[in-house]
Structures are given as structure tokens and as C-alpha cells.
Amino acid sequence: MSSPSPYETPARRRVLARAKTPAAAPAPAGLHTISLLVRDAPGVLVRVAMVFSRRGYNIESLVVSASAESGFSRMTVTCSGDGAILEQMIQQLSKLVDVVHALDHTTSDRYETEIALIKVRCAGPLRREVLEIAEHFNAKVVDYAPESVILRVYGSSEKLDAMVSLFAPEQIVDLVRSGKIVMARALDMT
């Protein structure tokens, strides 16, 4: 009889049990949000990225942060592609030694958000227009300069896209986006 894995927890057993039940129809090709709980160890990010690379998938965004459990990190990967192939990739990710669990949240009930910093050129009368746009999107001005402002905005990716589209390309001096983070609603596992 083999000894249980040090990562074997009731939550992991529930995830694995769910994975063995018949799955719903694969998600269509499009944007997918994958959440991974991984052990803090050197090389984990490279091994996860290699799973995507071997299949020719481009990672749209990748966010890695501390998790609620000490010694573990949460990875949120956003990528686009065929749902059936992505399902196989999630199974491969789950088999990696340092991955506790991997879940596709594309069709689950979840909360997603993203943050952006936007440096906008706005001198003189243009500043008022920029500040009105910021107010409409509940963006906060985090830096004032004589010829520019830096805006911090958070929300859905669509909200950020809409705000950015209102500025002329020559107005945007710099743009940094965090990438999407996700959390399953209620008591579901992220």
C-alpha cells in the first residue's frame, strides 16, 4: 500500500472526484481562464508554460501570486484555443508533480477582474475630458504631471478595453495590465 501524497487533502480529493465524472460538452474555441494551485518551488512556472508551448498555445495573460495556504501559489492563465485540446492540457497540468490542482473556469460561476495603469497625455483643456472618462469608469488618478495623468482602473477585461478605446492612440503614453484573476463563487474551489 502506497503512502498518501503530502498534497492529498479533502479539497484535492473533491477536485479529482469531479474530474472523473462525465464532463459537460467541451467549451468552444475562445478565451479560457485556468486556475492552478501549485507548490512554491523553483522551475514550476517553466514546467507549466512548457505544457502550453508543446501544444502551440499562446498564453494571453499569466498571473502568479501567493495563495491562502503557506507554501503554495495560485496561477491564473488566460489562453485561447480549442476546448477539447485544452481539456487534455488541464489533465497534463494536473499530473505535474508540483501542481495540486488545475481547473478551467471558463464555464463555471466565477468572479473575474483585472487592473490597469494607463498613462494619458493630457495638457490644457484635454485634461478635463480625460478626467471625465476616468470618472465614468470609476478610475482613480494616481499621478498628476503637467502634461499627463496616470489612471488606475479595475474591472472586467471588457471594461478596461472600453476605457482604453476612448483615448486616441497618441494620447496613451504607456499602458500596463495585470492580466485576469479569477475566483470561483460561493464555496466552489478556485
Image (tube, helix red, strand yellow):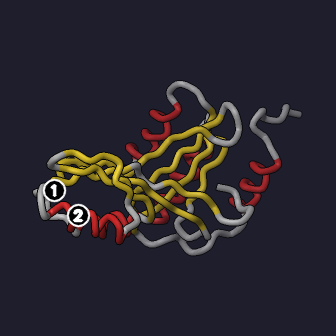
Give the total of numbered labels: 2
Residue 128 position in % (x across, y down): 21, 65
Q: In this view, does 168 lie above or below 175?
A: below
Can residue 57 be seen?
A: no
| Label 2, residues with CA under 10 Å away: few <14, some 14-19, many ≥20 | many
Res. 151 image quadrant: bottom left
Name the amino acid type tagged 2.
Val
Percent from the top left, x then y, of residue 26? Answer: 53, 70
Please report the residue visible at 71 percent of the width from the left and 38 percent of the height from the top: 69
Residue denoted by label 1? 122
| Residue that protrudes farthest toward the bottom in the picture | 25
Q: Name the residue under label 2.
A: 130
Q: Answer with left or right where residue 82 lies relative to residue 190.
A: left
> Front-most of 113 and 94?
113
Give amino acid for label 1: Cys
Q: Quadrant of the C terminus?
A: bottom right
